[in-house]
Image: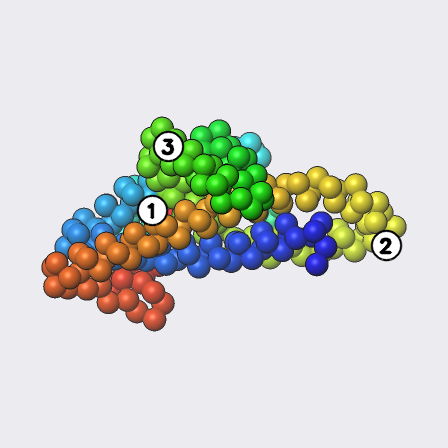
Amino acid sequence: MSNAIMPFFWVAFALIILLVMQRWIHTHLHGLSLLLMGKPERAVILYAIVLLPGVFLHEVSHWLAATFLGVRTGSFSVIPRMQPDGTVQLGYVEYFKGRTLGPIRESIIGGAPLISGTAVILLIGFRVFGVTELAAAVQSGQIETLSVALGQVFQTPDFLLWLYLLFAIANGMMPSRSDRRAWPAFIWTMVVVGIVLSLLGWMGLLINSLAGPAATVFGYLGLALSMAIGVNLLFMAIIAAFEGIVGRIKGVSVVYSSVEAPKGTKNVTI
């Protein structure tokens, strides 16, 4: 496979991995909160507090994108709410979907949290953890160089705080099902535009002019998603360990249904 198209395939693969991870983390973090707090109402509060930075960035991103695109917005909230059907809503932003909204603007609004979350993860990675030096150490293949680079990462001031922020943002930036609602129409619009450009003979020129910048953008996106996957793996292990320990201490466990939701709850929306 050509190195030029590897970033595109890795981003698509990493997004799928993160969606699966996010579902597991939200479900089991909620389950752990239920074990700790005992009552579903209190569990939702603890669970929402843990993910609050990511939820806040998610909703602010929706609001900023809608405002920038000239779409009128309504109420804004990051307070968790139990829905009548048993789902948990961690936050929401209201915006008005008039006839002029269209699939392109609605898709941008829906995808805004992924864009902002990626930017913040890269900012923390480069400015706080120095992933440039770590990446160079990995590429060098020398154990000594890698151990030194990892040691510098662990010695970062407020290391645990920044690691937690990465975790919260990584699990709040993925677009929800409602955020992705306009994406099929957007994709079909792009397909039609591509066909028109091909008929006009402009598609080759457009691809050649955008290939380089697109590969760079997707390369950075892939780096951010890779960091999110790494952080999620660490926290998944921590959540699973705490869930097992607390369950043994209290002599109870959370029963998950076939759709991986704690008993008494269903899905979680952001």
Instruction: Name the residue tied to disc 1.
Output: 90
SS of the residue at dot 2?
helix
Q: Which residue lies at the image location 26% right of the left edge and 56% below the top edge?
A: 241
Type of the residue with mark 1: Leu
Q: Nearer the viewer, mark 3 or mark 1?
A: 3
Three-letter code, disc 2: Leu
Residue 266 lies in quadrant: bottom left
Residue 256 visible in the picture: yes
Are there few (<14), some (14-19), or many (20+) residues within 10 Å of tag 2?
few
* Residue plotted at (18% across, 48% down): 42
* Amino acid bearing label 3: Gln
Q: Are marks 1 and 2 in contact (CB under 8 Å)?
A: no
Mark 2 lies on residue: 199
Reading the image, the residue beneath label 3 is 155
Residue 86 position, x and y percent, is 28, 59
- Of the pair 246 and 140, the residue shown nearer to us: 140
Q: Is residue 152 above or below residue 113?
A: above
**Percent x, y for residue 130?**
49, 33
Secondary structure at numbered mark 3: loop
Q: Residue at x 52, y 54 (%)?
A: 15
Asked whether the viewer can see residue 65, the reply is no
Residue shown at the point (71%, 49%) measured from the top left: 4
How many angstroms separate mark 1 from mark 2 (CA)? 46 Å
Residue 154 falls in image quadrant: top left
Which label was assigned to residue 190?
none
First of labels 3, 1 by sequence position: 1
- Would residue 151 appear left or right of 196 to someone viewing this image? left
Q: Residue furthest right?
A: 201
